[in-house]
Amino acid sequence: MRIIQISDSHISTDTPQRLADLERCVTAVNEQGPDLVIHTGDIAHDASVEEYRLARDVLEQLQAPWYVMPGNRDDRNRLVEIFHDKLSMHEGFIQYTLDEYPVRLLLIDTLSTMSNKGALCEVRMQHIQQVFSENGPTPLMVFMHHTPFEVTEIPDPFQFEDWSAVEQLLEIFTGCKELRAVYCGHVHRNVATRINNLPISAITCMACDLRKGKIPDEERQRPSYKVIDC
Ligand SMILES: [Fe+2]
């Protein structure tokens, strides 16, 4: 099975180039022949209906089934309005599992209405706990917008409001031997680490103008996506 992760398209009516970046990315992803594509959030930059419609029109060109989840720039209600058939809900959050594949996928909603940092409230944590406790022997993968690890390359390495929630999350993650990996976006650079041998990574943004870090020009312009063969 081939999953492709894409992230942070930041579609903006003020920066039309980002739509072209997304289009190039969709073309490149189709060439890789995935079974499934997951967009790990920050679909639109200002979360307007117009931006979401523009993004959706391009994402519709994906040949594989595709799903979305929220990033900090997204608006939960608008996302549900425009992408209702590309996501599922749990008690008001865009947090859900995809169970029809050989690997079970959990998409975690880390959106906070208070800040750009990630948040995990009681409702979301309980749902995550439930998913893990009922999982059984099925391999599992997690997708979430914010990085639940210290990204030392950026000025503020901690991208959650409450780091104790992350510690709780990591305890669940590392206690599950079926969990294969965790895939994130948000930090606009490619980073990867291991926590107790669990691979956790983030991919850079599809929006070329927002890529961070010292990277060669050629890499700055390349379509960003992550191929996950499992
Ligand atoms: Fe973000």
Image (cartoon, rainbow, N blue to C red):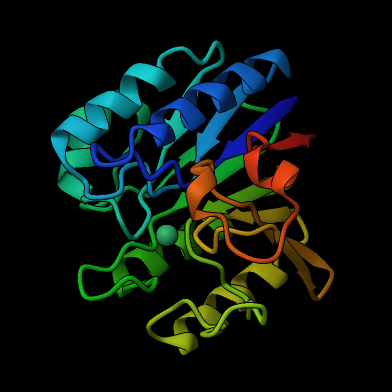
- Residue 3 falls in which quadrant of the image? top right
Between residue 135 and residue 31, name the one nearer to us: 31
Residue ranking furthest to the front: 217
Between residue 130 and residue 42, name the one nearer to us: 42
Between residue 226 and residue 189, name the one nearer to us: 189
- The residue shown at (64%, 52%) is 203
Q: Position of residue 61 (x, y in %)?
A: 46, 12
Relative to 27, is 189 above or below?
below
- Residue 221 falls in which quadrant of the image? top right
Q: Quadrant of the N terminus?
A: top right
- The residue shown at (32%, 24%) is 56
Q: Position of residue 89 (x, y in %)?
A: 29, 43
18 with respect to 147 (left or right): left
Q: Is residue 139 visible?
A: no
209 with respect to 216 (left or right): left
Q: Position of residue 114 (x, y in %)?
A: 21, 75
Q: Position of residue 196 (x, y in %)?
A: 81, 76
Between residue 139 and residue 111, name the one nearer to us: 111
Relative to 163, is 133 above or below?
above
Residue ranking furthest to the right: 197
58 with respect to 73 (left or right): right
How many numbered marks appear? 0
Relative to 221, is 59 above or below?
above
Ligand 1 occupies quarter: bottom left
Q: Is residue 202 visible?
A: yes
- The residue shown at (56%, 15%) is 64
224 with respect to 87 (left or right): right
Q: Quadrant of the C terminus?
A: top right
- The residue shown at (17%, 31%) is 50
